[in-house]
Amino acid sequence: MAVPTVMNEDHFRVMSEICANLCRDANARAIYVIDKNGQLIATAGESERFDSTALASLVAGEMAATGGLAKLIGEEDFNVLFHEGVRDHVHISLVANRVILVVIFDNRSSLGLVRLRVKKVSAELREIFERMLHESELPGANPVFSEITEQDIDSLFE
Amino acid sequence: MALINLKTREINCKVVYYGPGLCGKTTNLQYVYNKTSPQVKGRMISLATDTDRTLFFDFLALNMGEIRGFKVRLQLYTVPGQVFYDASRKLILRSVDGVVFVADSQIERMEANQESFDNLSVNLSEHGYDLQKIPLVIQYNKRDLPNAAPRDAMSRVLNPMGRPEFEAVATNGSGVFDTLKAAAKLVLRDIKNKSEAQQL
């Protein structure tokens, strides 16, 4: 049975710290951590300047399409995508085949630096994401919904 | 699968509008987008061809309100209905929490409805979902057209499981929000049931 993924304060804090450190070390404008299904998990930097929800769904869609393309030519996946703009560039990488790390940077940084820093944080990100998924499956992981009544749900639509 | 963020107190769920080409999936989303206030909606994204046919997906994020201090956010997606975009449909169904099947009521589209419904079942099962168990709402769209098939006949073919079903005219909004609300309710109930089962 697939259960909801539950991100608690500890998961959120660790992921936010990873994003903040990466943003600083890669001299990036913004960092987003998105799950493969398009749900936004954590951000850092100037992330609020962009529509985060829309960005998350587009990146997940793009990653999914690229994955389909990879399989079509016999590759397991393409783990890194890079979009080069005039001022801003986007580096997208798939971590542990589960989570997507997006780095938006401009000419104050470089692709080489971003790649290096992304590689360094990937292991940390993988660890916390796997812990979050594992803990989501434990009994009592989702205290919110076990307390919600049918009446609460009905009242949302009155 | 839904994401519950205990820190930001948000519950995010994914609902996919499925159905044959030109049945009105994008029109449903456009109506929801046009009739909701800017405070509760995000940007609507449509990845479409030059002729406005959905190429990959449409996307709209909606804030539905709060349950016990938790913001309920729905992410609405449509799939491309045209038969040859099956690979895209599969991708969009990944981690879905609920489905709205939009059927085209025109009698000559019954075969396309049936084909799309069967395709939904196949694609869900490829992701490990069971059509019999997933939160599902059926919408009979285009009820205003003179060649609309009788609702009972459509129901017999597309809804033998007796899921919630609604008549709609998505172009004028009739039935659009009823469908959406029913789908959201089913999704939240499903998450609640799974969470309760997890406690045992």
Image (tube, rainbow, N blue to C red):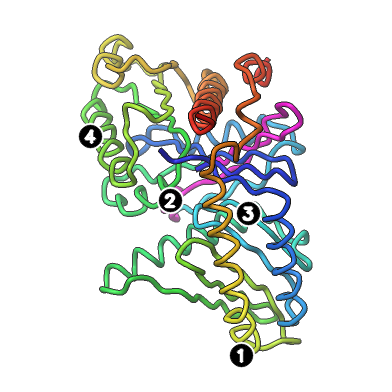
Q: Is residue B84 magenta?
A: no
**Label 2 belongs to which residue?**
B51
Q: Are marks 2 and 3 on the same chain?
A: no
**What chain does badge 4 belong to?**
B
Q: Which residues are magenta?
A: B49-76
**Label 4 belongs to which residue?**
B115
**What chain does badge 1 belong to?**
A
**Label 1 belongs to which residue?**
A112
Give the alpha-carbon distance from disc 4 to disc 2, as whole Å.
24 Å
Snapshot quadrant of residue A70: bottom left
**What chain does badge 2 belong to?**
B
Nearer to the camera, A128 or A52: A128
The amino acid type found where label 1 is placed reads Gly
Q: Nearer the viewer, mark 3 or mark 4?
A: 3
Q: Nearer the viewer, mark 4 or mark 2?
A: 4
Q: Are marks 2 and 1 on the same chain?
A: no
Q: Which mark is residue B114?
A: none
**What chain does badge 3 belong to?**
A
Snapshot quadrant of residue A42: bottom right
Q: Please report the residue visible at 31 percent of the width from the left and 18 percent of the height from the top.
A: B159
Q: Please report the residue visible at 76 percent of the width from the left and 87 percent of the height from the top.
A: A108
Helix, strand or loop at mark 4: helix
Residue B116 placement (x, y as % from top left): 28, 35
Residue B19 placement (x, y as % from top left): 35, 35
Nearer to the camera, B191 or A141: A141
Helix, strand or loop at mark 2: loop
Graded by Cα atoms within 10 Å as few (under 14), some (14 to 19) or many (20 or more), the crowding at tag 1 reads few
Relative to A135, is B34 on the left or the right? right
Q: Are marks 3 and 4 on the same chain?
A: no
In the depicted structure, whether residue A25 falls above or below residue A37: below
Of mark 1 and mark 3, the one earlier in the sequence is 3
The amino acid type found where label 2 is placed reads Thr
